[in-house]
Image (cartoon, grey):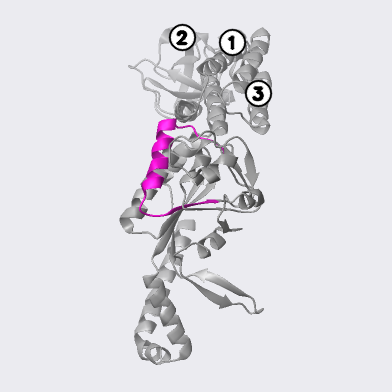
């Protein structure tokens, strides 16, 4: 029904567009007459100016400067040069870099040699531009900062030829927007990116009077916003410390959950994908791999006690190892307290309460004993040929059967053996004779369809 309503809405919009195009054709003479009025002549003149005013490109640089973001900046500079942009503006909010000095130096040289002026605007309010990437201001044509932002801790210059009048106060300290203006670091008063644009050299503007009598300027020059691709944005997000850490925790926990349940593999697939994405992020970030090993060992320790269904010594050892690994995971980067609290609290909740309780009450383990299941009657949730999933007393189990006796979906089955966490089953009718007499129960517990 929802799809049908959406389709109807699309048809309605297309009909309106068709009517509008028809009206445009019949109104051509009226538009020509209207063009002779003073207001129309002003609008036409403004449009003509805008067509000749060129364009300015703006790209957002947010988060750590990683290989994805560095490549995006480099390709944006090349694209601005090839398309003849008036300038390229980097709207930045970044607190560090995770690329090599060589990559960062190449970016600085590309900014220096660019035929298109490159500007830097730190904003919006609350943004920070710190770390070696702050040396961009030494290669920029102009710099602006929004109120409430900070800039600095750029370190020693990576290349020659940077504007040291700007960089000198930023080598080992940060400055506010007002301090940057007093020191001559910023060249524009730019509370917003719009203010930055209208005050930029070469940008054509016009004054507009609002209803309250106030006048403001708006750019006639076109503004084009460059965007990073969705896949690149995903990789950039994954390469942030908090996301990589949480994905690592989620992936390992889900895989352990999958090992001790009789699910159909969803948790395992999600866990594997999480681990792959986390692996990429950890490879990009400055990671202490021995800390990753501690987290892996912690998960193994948790799994030992999950097997017994009771948190004991290994759970305590796992908690200690996981906390140490979490606090030392990255070299030179720190996780926020919120991120650490979420990670540690989630692990404690899962391995002290959730998983042991689930194993004890629903799925059982060899420690508790599952001999009662031999001879139990159940139902095939999926075809078992030779592997599949069955339902025994409201619980789902992985199951296998002899290839000579395949079981169809929804057929009744009998448990004839247990191999680890996999049940060996046969059809209720037509199975091996020697198992029939071992069934102490009837099929009364099987819910009716």
Circle 3 residues within 10 Å: few <14, some 14–19, many ≥20: some
Q: Mark 2 or mark 1: which is in front?
A: 1
* Quarter of the view holding residue 130: top right
Residue sitting at 52 percent across and 65 percent down?
Answer: 198
Q: Is residue 30 left or right of residue 391?
A: left
Asked whether the residues under the numbered discs 3 and 2 touch, taking CB atoms below 8 Å apart as contact, a structural biologist would say no
Asked whether the residues under the numbered discs 2 and 1 touch, taking CB atoms below 8 Å apart as contact, a structural biologist would say no
Q: As displayed, is residue 28 above or below residue 299?
A: below
Q: Is residue 253 left or right of residue 5?
A: right
Closer to the chain start, of discs 2 and 1, is 1
Disc 3 versus disc 2: distance between alpha carbons? 36 Å
Q: Position of residue 212 (x, y in %)?
A: 67, 78
Secondary structure state at the residue bearing disc 2: helix
Residue sitting at 46 percent across and 61 percent down?
Answer: 6
Task: Give the labeled residue for mark 2.
Answer: 435
Q: Of the numbered discs in the image, which one, if any, rests on residue 69?
A: none
Q: Magenta segment, which residues?
A: 93-121
Nearer to the camera, 27 or 375: 27
Q: Position of residue 325 (x, y in %)?
A: 59, 18
Q: Position of residue 424 (x, y in %)?
A: 45, 14
Closer to the chain start, of discs 3 and 2, is 3
Disc 2 versus disc 1: distance between alpha carbons? 33 Å
Q: Of the numbered discs in the image, which one, if any, rests on residue 354?
A: 3
Secondary structure state at the residue bearing disc 1: helix
Is residue 447 visible in the rendered image? The answer is: no
Q: Position of residue 404 (x, y in %)?
A: 32, 16
Task: Give the labeled residue for mark 1.
Answer: 304
Nearer to the camera, 217 or 140: 140
Residue sitting at 49 percent across and 33 percent down?
Answer: 239
């Amino acid at each position: 029904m929802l799809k049908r309503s959406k389709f109807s809405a699309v048809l309605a919009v297309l009909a309106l567009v068709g009517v509008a195009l028809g009206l445009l054709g019949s109104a051509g003479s009226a538009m020509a007459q209207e063009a002779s009025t003073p207001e129309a002549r002003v609008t036409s003149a403004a449009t003509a100016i805008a067509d000749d005013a060129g364009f300015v490109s703006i790209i957002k640089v947010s988060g750590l400067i990683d290989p994805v973001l560095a490549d995006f900046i480099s390709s944006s500079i090349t694209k601005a040069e090839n398309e003849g942009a008036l300038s390229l503006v980097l709207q930045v909010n970044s607190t560090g870099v995770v690329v090599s000095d060589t990559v960062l130096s190449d970016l600085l040289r590309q900014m220096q040699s660019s035929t298109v002026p490159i500007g830097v605007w730190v904003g919006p309010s609350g943004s920070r531009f710190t770390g070696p990437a702050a040396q961009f201001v030494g290669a920029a044509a102009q710099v602006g900062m929004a109120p409430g932002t900070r800039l600095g801790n750029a370190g020693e210059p990576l290349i020659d030829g940077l504007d040291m009048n700007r960089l000198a106060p930023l080598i080992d300290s940060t400055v506010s927007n007002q301090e940057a203006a007093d020191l001559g670091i910023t060249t524009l008063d730019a509370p917003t990116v719009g203010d930055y644009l209208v005050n930029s050299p070469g940008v054509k503007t016009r004054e507009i009077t609002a209803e309250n009598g106030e006048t403001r300027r708006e750019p006639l020059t076109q503004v084009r916003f460059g965007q990073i691709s969705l896949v690149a944005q995903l990789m950039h997000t994954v390469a942030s410390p908090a996301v990589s850490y949480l994905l690592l925790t989620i992936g390992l926990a889900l895989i352990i959950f999958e090992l001790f349940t009789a699910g159909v593999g969803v948790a395992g697939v999600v866990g594997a994908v999480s681990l792959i994405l986390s692996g990429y992020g950890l490879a990009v970030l400055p990671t202490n791999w021995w800390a990753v090993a501690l987290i892996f060992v912690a998960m193994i320790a948790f799994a030992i006690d999950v097997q017994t269904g009771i948190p004991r010594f290994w759970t305590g050892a796992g908690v200690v190892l996981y906390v140490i690994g979490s606090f030392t995971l990255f070299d030179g980067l720190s996780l926020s307290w919120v991120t650490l609290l979420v990670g540690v609290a989630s692990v404690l909740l899962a391995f002290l309460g959730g998983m042991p309780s689930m194993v004890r009450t629903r799925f059982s383990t060899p420690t508790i004993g599952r001999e009662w299941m031999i001879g139990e009657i159940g139902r095939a949730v999926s075809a078992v040929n030779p592997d599949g999933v069955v339902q025994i007393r409201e619980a789902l189990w992985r199951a296998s059967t002899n290839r000579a006796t395949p079981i169809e979906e929804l057929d009744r089955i009998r448990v004839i053996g247990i191999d680890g966490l996999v049940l060996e089953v046969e059809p209720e009718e037509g199975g091996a004779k020697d198992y029939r007499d071992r069934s102490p129960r009837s099929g009364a517990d099987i819910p009716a369809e």
